[in-house]
Amino acid sequence: MSDTTEFQILIVDDARDIREPLGQYLRKQGLRTQLATGAAEARRILDEAVIHLVVLDIMMPGEDGLSLCRALVARGGPPVILLTAMADETDRIVGLELGADDYIVKPFNPRELLARIRAVLRRVPPPELPVPTGRRRFAGWEHDAAAHSLSSGSGETVGLTSGESRLLGVLLDHPRTVLSRARLLDLTAGRDAKAYDRAVDNTISRLRRKIEKDPGSPRLIVTEWGGGYMLAADVEQL
């Protein structure tokens, strides 16, 4: 897969002068990036976001990169490229034995790391997005994920596109929780779509026209400025 704009990279390094410039460089090359100062912060991000590859420094205070690499491989996590010091040949060997996909020695050329990232991503098969099923009720509406439809208590039925149904399903999975555009893209588009933030806004706008009494002043799918979107309703599984 040559279009890397669909992927999100996590950079884990306690050195700010490496972590931040590298994140800026990868973003300029079209990759989405998140930054972590250590293993604890990386674990939190991995639990909250869809990460497709981890660039991981070995030598960090607290839990080191080899320990985090071992944990990621054990749980079938994203591929790992290790950042190692010139003298850490033993750590590089151990990292590869643990299941790291590649390594690069500091100091490195960011262009070389970008080439290695793209090479690893080309080897990773895109995951299949789960096909949503089931029915759920919220704010007087009933969502049938399999049929891509909504029905109201009065018997009104509203058809949804597959994209609208999937996005609504994600909001129903996380009621009263703010989801960023990036998170919504990860959960609805996966790697196969040419995802962009405006696609989320457009789909939200169409959903509001279908379920809100006043789409111009939404009460169900609300905007959190600087954060994302939230379903402001309780959800009942049917």
Image: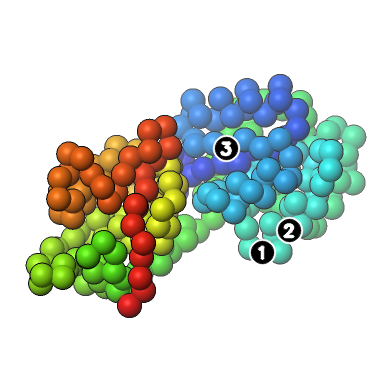
Q: Can residue 167 be spotted in the picture? A: yes
Q: Are marks 1 and 2 in contact (CB under 8 Å)?
A: yes
Labels 3 and 1: the sequence-earlier one: 3
Is 94 placed left or right of 226 in the picture?
right
Q: State the mark number for residue 34.
A: 3
Report, in whole angstroms, how far the alpha carbon at label 1 lies from the one at label 2: 6 Å
Q: Position of residue 95 (x, y in %)?
A: 79, 51
Badge 1 is on which residue? 75
Circle 1: residue type = Arg
Residue 123 visible in the snapshot: no
Q: Secondary structure at mark 3?
A: strand
Q: Amino acid at mark 2?
A: Ala
Tag 3 near tag 1, CB within 8 Å: no
Q: Point out the tag, 3 or 2, that comes first from the N-terminus.
A: 3
Q: Nearer the viewer, residue 129 or 113?
A: 129
Image quadrant containing the C terminus: bottom left
Residue marked by disc 2: 71
Secondary structure at numbered mark 1: loop
| Horizontal arrangement in the rendering, residue 110 relative to residue 211 (left or right) | right
Residue furthest out toward the bottom: 238
